[in-house]
Amino acid sequence: MPTPRKPSKSNARSARPGAPASLATLSAHLGLSAAAISRVLNGVPAARSIPKATQDRIFAAAKEFNYRPNILARSLQRGHSMTVGVLMPEVSEGYATLVLAGIEQALLQAGYFYFLNSHHHRAELIERSMRMFEERSVDGMIAIDTVLHEVSHLPTVTVSCPLQQDDVTNITLNHRRAAELAFDHLSGLGHTSVAVIKGQQFSSDTEPRWQAIRHAAAKARITLDTKLVAQLEGDAPTSEPGYFAAQRLLAANTPFSALFTFNDVSAIGAIRALREAGLLVPQDVSVVGFDDVQSAAFQNPGLTTVRQPLRTMGILAAESLVHQIAAPAGHIPAKQLMVDPELIVRESTCPPPARRQLR
């Protein structure tokens, strides 16, 4: 039990209710050692030996004098700042935001906060953000859909990053399985002429997904006509790139009965272009999206899509990073964690016109 000291009237008078107070102020006011007060306020096991009445006095004084512990100083004494840096292309509806939601959930559960920087695929902003994270003494970093040509000395986890780096764990989707789900669905409905909208060149998912699409199309015995492949252009995080990509497909004057898009946001834009051309979805053209963003189920028609478990990917990224931060020196993290997709069938797909007539 701590030995009470005679309160210092001068120090006690110097503390004013409502103004931030230090442990020294509480010690002078209560006549207790700063160590004893700290043990109680931090809930350490050693505080159990202090009588409840004394603990109640300590909590009451901390509230009266608006005491706030210096979390940064305490965490740095333990060797951790309890903060993480997160890099993402932009904050908008869709892929990155849903991944971020999972990251936030897992970090908060682990007692971490995070700094968030958007880089808009500009290399100088990526470099500046990484430098800023290091200057702010973050414990680690997570990069979403971001190409890291240089890796920080900090523990690092990436989500959908094509470049495999030493000591970096990459959370990735099984793209081959995702493409197979889409093409098996369309082939099963009877579609043989399928158009594809690829992702932007800067997206880390574009090339692996395109290779997966080529494999899945061949497996489903669907020939991909080069005239029926368009690529998203520009970095606008809206439906506009999908709208213009679909217009280019229509301008090729090569008939198609189904369209597989790079993401749900571009699928929404493509559907508008199809309707403006006088085509019905899905009666004339079936459309399959990718990601399963929150608004996909509420489109008209509801969007059939390949669901990425984006929130789960974010949770995995955060949990993996926290594990790396706590791991002993010399720990070698996993190189890759792969998650599986799921096909969500809604109203934007149906058999092609000829098949429906036969039925």
Image: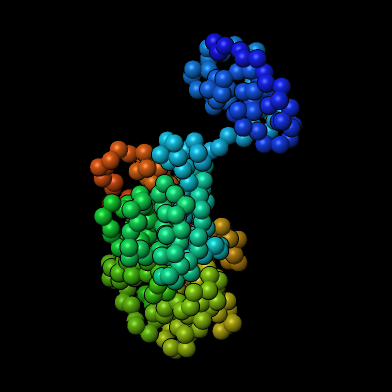
Query: Which picture quadrant has residue 229?
Result: bottom left
Tell whether 189 sits left or right of 3.
left
Query: Residue at horizontal 32%, vertical 73%?
Result: 222
Q: Position of residue 47 (x, y in %)?
A: 53, 17
Tell whether 310 sits left or right of 220.
right
Question: Between 31 and 43, which is closer to the camera in this rendering?
Answer: 31
Q: Position of residue 182 (x, y in %)?
A: 39, 64
In the rendered image, is residue 282 in sight? Answer: no
Residue 282 versus residue 170 in the image, above or below? below
Q: Quadrant of the N terminus?
A: top right
Residue 263 versus residue 317 in the image, above or below? below
* Visual colour scheme: rainbow
In the rendered image, is residue 153 in sight? Answer: yes
Question: Between 242 and 354, which is closer to the camera in this rendering?
Answer: 242
Query: Which picture quadrant has residue 174?
Result: bottom left
Query: Residue at horizontal 53%, vertical 38%?
Result: 71
Query: Residue at horizontal 51%, vertical 81%?
Result: 244
Question: Between 294 and 48, which is closer to the camera in this rendering?
Answer: 48
Question: Between 88 and 218, which is closer to the camera in this rendering?
Answer: 88
Query: Residue at horizontal 44%, vertical 36%?
Result: 77
Q: Position of residue 205 (x, y in %)?
A: 38, 66
Residue projecting furthest to the front = 10
Residue 256 versus residue 238 in the image, above or below? below
Q: Position of residue 349 (x, y in %)?
A: 49, 67
Count all numbered tags in the image, as a single digit: 0
